[in-house]
Amino acid sequence: MADKGPLLVVTEQREGALVVSPKGEVGYHEAPTLRTALREAFDKKPKRLVANLAGVSYMATPGLATLVEALQISKRTQTPLVLCNLTDRVRAVFEIAKLHTIFKIADSVDAATAP
């Protein structure tokens, strides 16, 4: 947990998908920022929502809970949710929590946006 600052979230349209790219750590104080960005992305009714986690250096339980909530919204709205570019540290948290078995996870934004 080196660079502790506000979570920055960039959203961009790409190949029929809306890509949400947070940058920074996702802990207790930052999770609401990610939650808001994901909810706003779902409100735009994209064909697919991609969470590009390449810029996430650390994720605590609130960040995981935020992504689980996004998965629930995804199922309810029938909007596919794909996570991509998980760093080794973030991937380990997903594996410990067994969440890698319920999320669709891609290696890159290109793979995540492919039909």
Image (spheres, rainbow, N blue to C red):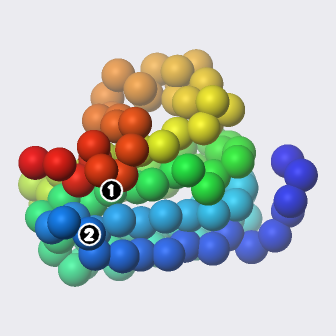
Instruction: Name the residue carrying label 1.
Output: 50
**Element under disc 2:** strand
- At a point 56% along the width and 50% down the height, the residue shown is 54
Choose top left, top right, bottom left or bottom right for residue 13: bottom left
27 lies left or right of 49: right
Whether the residues at callouts 1 and 2 have beta carbons within 8 Å, the answer is yes
**Position of residue 101 measured from the top left corner of the image (x, y, whole percent):** 35, 22
- Name the residue type under label 2: Arg
> Which of pointers 1 and 2 indicates the residue nearer the eye?
2
Query: In the rendered structure, which disc, 1 or 2, sits on the residue that comes first in sequence?
Result: 2
- At a point 63% along the width and 52% down the height, the residue shown is 56
Residue 19 bears which disc, if any? none
111 lies left or right of 36: left
- Name the residue type under label 1: Val
- 100, above or below 60, in the image: above
Number of numbered discs overlaid on the protein picture: 2
Residue 72 appears anywhere in the view: no
> For the residue carrying disc 2, how many other residues have a C-alpha within 10 Å: few (<14), some (14-19), or many (20+)?
some
26 lies left or right of 48: right
Residue 48 appears anywhere in the view: yes
Whole-angstrom CA distance, mark 1 to mark 2, is 10 Å
**Position of residue 23 measured from the top left corner of the image (x, y, whole percent):** 63, 63
**Position of residue 52 measured from the top left corner of the image (x, y, whole percent):** 45, 54
75 or 9, nearer to the observer: 9
Name the residue furthest front.
Answer: 110
> For the residue carrying disc 1, how many other residues have a C-alpha within 10 Å: few (<14), some (14-19), or many (20+)?
many
Name the residue furthest right.
Answer: 2
Instruction: Name the residue carrying label 2.
Output: 14
- 90, above or below 26, in the image: above
**Position of residue 77 measured from the top left corner of the image (x, y, whole percent):** 13, 60
